[in-house]
Amino acid sequence: MTNRRSLARLFNGQLLRRAIWLALLSLLILPVSLFAQTPDNLVEIMLDAEESYRAGRFEQAVSEYETVIAAGVEHSTLYYNLGNAYLRQGDLGRAILNFRRAQRLDPRDDDIANNLDLARAQTVDKLQVSGLEQVDFGRLVGEWLTLEEMMVLLLALWFLICLSAGLYTIMPSYRRELGWLIIGWVGLLFLSAAAIGSSLYAEAQNPTAVVILSEVEVTEGPGSADEFNVNFALHAGTEVRIIDRRLGWRQIALPGDLNGWVPNNAIELVTGES
């Protein structure tokens, strides 16, 4: 298993980005309570978390990493370290959940992928995770690019279109070549926009979640085993897709047309939304 990562990798870029956001938010005169945790406080907490991890105090490390996340910091390294701390505790559900969150922010990272595979190999329910994913262009793109990278790609394509259009007007002798180039850029722009839209729609409609309880009974309807038949049981770390919601319950889907209902507290969304 690849170990946790250092504080420097997290905060080199994170502090600058956080400072920019804090400056922008301050213009809106937000409540002082939002700034209770300053970047310096967070660095100190992260250092404490790393020390706790090295000393084998994984429960304390988890608490400290969670404090940083609760303060609004979102970074793949942070979720990766938190996943490792949970894995050391034997909490497969929350380990896989946080590795998935790390992978969502950095989909091409080998360490995240390796530790996610290691955690998956220890789960009780041996399901084909790829069977959860609908095969479409949007999901394929999402496996390689983050949402931020997709947006940068769109902006880059738009810039190239504008640049090519400008050259088209001032270089009449190259209009034929530039015309084809503009058509190509526009095609890529629409293809990229469609991929982003498809990825966002799929995640909004059927978001991925992870079972965090040690065991949960999956029932035929939105209620307990006293009210509905039990279809099967799932265990910590199993990855599912949410296909419906009722008050206090969620209908989940698994590979092989398996589906059923579980209580809200049995699973947690990879996106972190409630």
Image (cartoon, rainbow, N blue to C red):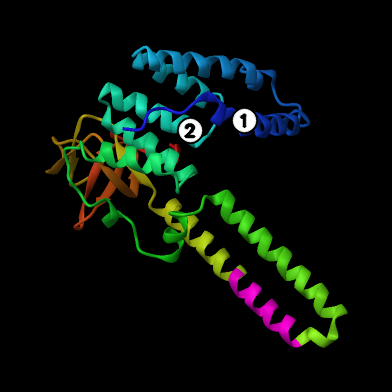
Question: Of marks 2 and 1, which one's residue comes earlier in the chain?
Answer: 1
Give how far across and how far down residue 268 sits, in percent: 36, 36
- Magenta-span inclusion, residue 180: yes
Residue 260, visible in the rendered structure: yes
| Residue sitting at x 45%, y 18% | 50
Q: What residue is shown at x 46% (from left), y 55% (from top)?
A: 142
Name the quadrant of the C terminus. Answer: top left
> Distance from label 2 to label 1 (Cα)?
12 Å
Q: Nearer the viewer, residue 183 or 114?
A: 114
Secondary element under disc 2, as helix, strand or loop, is helix
Asked if the stretch drawn in magenta spans residue 137, the answer is no
Q: Main secondary structure of the magenta part?
A: helix
Query: As displayed, is residue 165 above or below residue 123?
Result: below
> Going 52% across and 34% down the picture, which residue do you hit?
75
Bounds of the magenta span? Answer: 176-188
On-image quarter of the N terminus:
top left
Residue, disc 2: 77
Which residue was labeled with disc 1? 12
Does residue 157 appear to the left or right of 270 in the view shown?
A: right
